Image (cartoon, grey):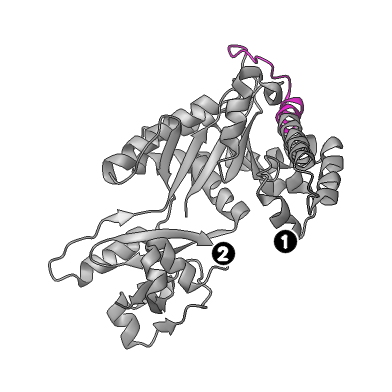
């Protein structure tokens, strides 16, 4: 499953600095994992998962040649969506082009500037609240235009849209400044509007870009509380980063990064916390495979069954699925791999309807 995060925000809020940090991480990533493909406005970075290194060590220890398998983490595509300014929904700042890019991503990372720097021009930015509302308004206006276009097409075809009354309700809420993601919709209603691909229906993470002197572990909770009230959003939606520090971290070695973060009071970088938050917002988990050829993480929706999980590896697996041999990650580590887990009865043969759990180590049994 491909996860893409669209980075949006007004000019000079820190998007470019953040994206450049991603590109530096990407360069290091591609050097180690050359299977990644790159587009000009996309940064492809690995999903941090320390479990993979441990699995690779276990496989190496059981290998008669002592060879360590290559590690292939799940990846995230960060899409740099520039040019969003006031009036974007009407084409300002190449708005139509960039609004179309937003339709293609899984989740939106809305960068909000929460620092002052007299050397950086704001270019339309006023304050965090106004900046945040400007972007949300443009997305809401774009969705209103989508509804109007949908109704127009329906009238031209002289057909009654099944969910026309529901669209009227959506339109009313959008005119009140309420985004679709903030509306209470049941599964049937969500399905009804899916084909219209509304921008404000996408899950949103607010990336609060703070200054270097603000970026300390002890400051995070007060900052989240402050901007929860200022922006009128839930605290679970906010990730606090310092784009400048992320750029500095990207050029350091792994040990240097850990020490830098430790000095600030953090265990993980802001980018890692952003990726984790995206997984939470989209309800994603990872299952793992561990063999001599490779150790790999695969991204699936929480609640997906073994049959769907097998299809992430190859669509043919779904047609030829027999069983899934499953060991939990803690058991796999404790009993030192497949052999020990089987000897201690920690492996389970599960059918296609088994609900995969985060961290399950799985080997699929496939027929001819």
Residues packed near mark 2 inside 10 Å, few (<14), some (14 to 19) or many (20 plus) = some
Q: Is residue 125 magenta?
A: yes
User: Is the residue 145 above or below the residue 73 in the image?
Assistant: above
Residue 202: x and y, percent?
65, 45
Q: Quadrant of the C terminus?
A: bottom left
Q: Is residue 103 visible?
A: yes
In this figure, which residue is indicated by the disc labeled 1? 187
Q: Look at the image and give the residue range highlighted in magenta.
A: 118-136
User: Is the residue 251 above or below the residue 341 in the image?
Assistant: above
Q: Can you tell which mark lies on residue 302?
A: 2
In the picture, residue 105 is in which quadrant? Answer: top right
Q: Which residue is painted at 36% across and 32% down in the image?
A: 251
Q: Label 1, secondary structure: give it.
A: helix
Residue 136: x and y, percent?
73, 33
- Residues 284 and 308: in front is 308
On screen, residue 83 versus residue 308, left or right, reads right
């Amino acid at each position: 499953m491909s996860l893409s995060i669209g980075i949006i925000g007004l000019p000079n809020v820190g998007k470019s600095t953040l994206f450049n940090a991603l590109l530096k991480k990407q360069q290091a990533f591609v050097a180690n994992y050359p299977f990644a493909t790159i587009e000009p406005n996309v940064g492809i970075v690995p999903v941090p998962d320390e479990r993979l290194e441990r699995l690779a060590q276990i496989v190496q220890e059981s290998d008669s040649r002592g060879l360590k398998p290559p590690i292939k983490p799940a990846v995230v595509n960060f899409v740099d969506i520039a040019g969003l300014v006031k009036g974007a929904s009407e084409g300002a700042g190449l708005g139509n082009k960039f609004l179309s890019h937003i339709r293609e991503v899984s989740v939106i990372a809305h960068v909000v500037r929460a620092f002052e720097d007299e050397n950086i021009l704001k270019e339309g930015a006023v304050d965090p609240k106004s900046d945040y509302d400007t972007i949300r308004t443009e997305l809401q206006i774009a969705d209103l235009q989508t509804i109007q276009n949908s109704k127009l097409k329906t009238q031209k075809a002289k057909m009654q849209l099944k969910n026309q009354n529901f669209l009227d309700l959506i339109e009313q809420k959008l005119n009140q400044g309420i985004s679709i993601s903030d509306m209470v919709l049941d599964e049937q209603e969500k399905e009804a509007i899916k084909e219209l691909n509304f921008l404000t229906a996408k899950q949103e993470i607010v990336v609060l870009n703070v200054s270097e002197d603000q970026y300390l572990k002890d400051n995070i909770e007060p900052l989240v509380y402050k901007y929860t009230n200022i922006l009128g959003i839930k605290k679970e939606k906010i990730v606090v980063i310092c784009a400048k520090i992320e750029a500095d971290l990207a050029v350091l070695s792994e040990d240097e990064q850990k020490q830098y973060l430790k000095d600030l009071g953090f265990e993980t970088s802001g980018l890692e916390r952003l990726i984790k938050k995206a997984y939470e917002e989209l309800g994603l988990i990872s299952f793992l495979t561990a063999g001599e050829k490779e150790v790999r993480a695969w991204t699936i929706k929480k609640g997906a069954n073994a049959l769907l999980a097998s299809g992430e590896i190859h669509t043919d697996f779904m047609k030829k699925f027999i069983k899934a041999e499953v060991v939990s990650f803690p058991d796999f580590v404790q009993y030192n791999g497949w052999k020990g887990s089987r000897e201690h009865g920690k492996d389970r043969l599960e059918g296609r309807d088994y609900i995969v759990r985060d961290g399950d180590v799985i080997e699929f049994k496939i027929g001819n």
